[in-house]
Image (cartoon, helix red, strand yellow):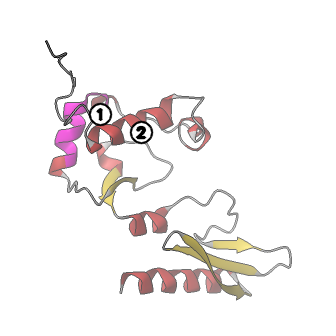
């Protein structure tokens, strides 16, 4: 007699979990597991998963009624906020690049870094690779170059 395969959330196929379930499991890990390599960027900064999303069916219902598609990823609108309905959306990788927290950025501008020379460099990610956009006298000029590059990626 063949052994039955159980999938407790009911969305998997052929013994595999669904993409939505894996997204939820990843959020839980980032927020709750101090041994996870990126915990310091999530749970270590106080970012939590809301109680209602600890239930997969509730998370799934929110996802499907808020634009989930297989080509999108979960994005926190306020990068210092929690994973919760009012702070999350489904976004493309490009959209996430725009709102990404800059770990080592003291300029306050995404994509801008202050160089030892006192000038400001700008860079972005294009096709998974960093692209240097130039070096500028002010962080505002560097940020303008960054925004221009992001806009060109979408055109």
User: Horizontal placement of 79 versus 53: left or right?
Assistant: right
52 and 155: which is toward the camera: 155
Say what secondary structure mark 1 lies in: helix
* Range of residues picked out in magenta: 54-63
Task: Tell me where residue 70 appears, x and y as whole percent.
Answer: 25, 56
Task: Tell me where residue 116 appears, x and y as whole percent.
Answer: 85, 73
Local crowd size for mark 2, using a 10 Å CA cut-off: few (<14), some (14–19), many (≥20): many
Residue bearing the label numbered 1: 53
Residue bearing the label numbered 2: 27
| Magenta stretch: includes residue 25 | no
Say what secondary structure mark 2 lies in: helix
Quadrant of the rendering where the C terminus is positioned: bottom left
| Magenta stretch: includes residue 58 | yes
Residue in the image at 60% along x and 71% along y: 109
The quarter of the displayed image where residue 56 is located: top left
Task: Tell me where residue 96 appears, x and y as whole percent.
Answer: 43, 63
Q: Residue 85, which numbered label?
A: none
In the rendered view, would you say 65 is above or below 152?
A: above
The quarter of the displayed image where residue 90 is located: bottom left
* Res. 49 visible in picture: no
User: Horizontal placement of 97 versus 7: left or right?
Assistant: right
Q: Please report whichever mark, 1 or 2, sits nearer to the chain's N-terminal start.
A: 2
Mark 1 to mark 2 CA distance (whole Å) = 10 Å
């Amino acid at each position: 007699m063949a052994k039955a395969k159980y999938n407790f959330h009911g969305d998997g196929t052929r013994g595999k979990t669904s993409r939505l379930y894996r997204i939820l499991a990843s959020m839980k890990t980032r927020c709750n597991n101090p041994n996870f390599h990126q915990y310091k960027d999530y749970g270590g900064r106080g970012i939590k998963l809301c109680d209602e999303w600890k239930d997969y069916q509730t998370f799934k219902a929110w996802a499907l009624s808020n634009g989930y598609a297989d080509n999108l990823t979960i994005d926190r609108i306020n990068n210092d906020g929690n994973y919760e309905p009012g702070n999350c959306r489904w976004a493309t990788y490009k959209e996430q690049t725009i709102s990404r927290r800059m770990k080592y950025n003291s300029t306050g501008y995404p994509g801008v870094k202050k160089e030892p020379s006192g000038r400001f460099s700008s860079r972005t990610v294009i096709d998974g690779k960093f692209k240097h956009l130039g070096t500028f006298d002010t962080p505002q000029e560097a940020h303008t170059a960054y925004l221009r590059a992001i806009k060109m990626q979408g055109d």
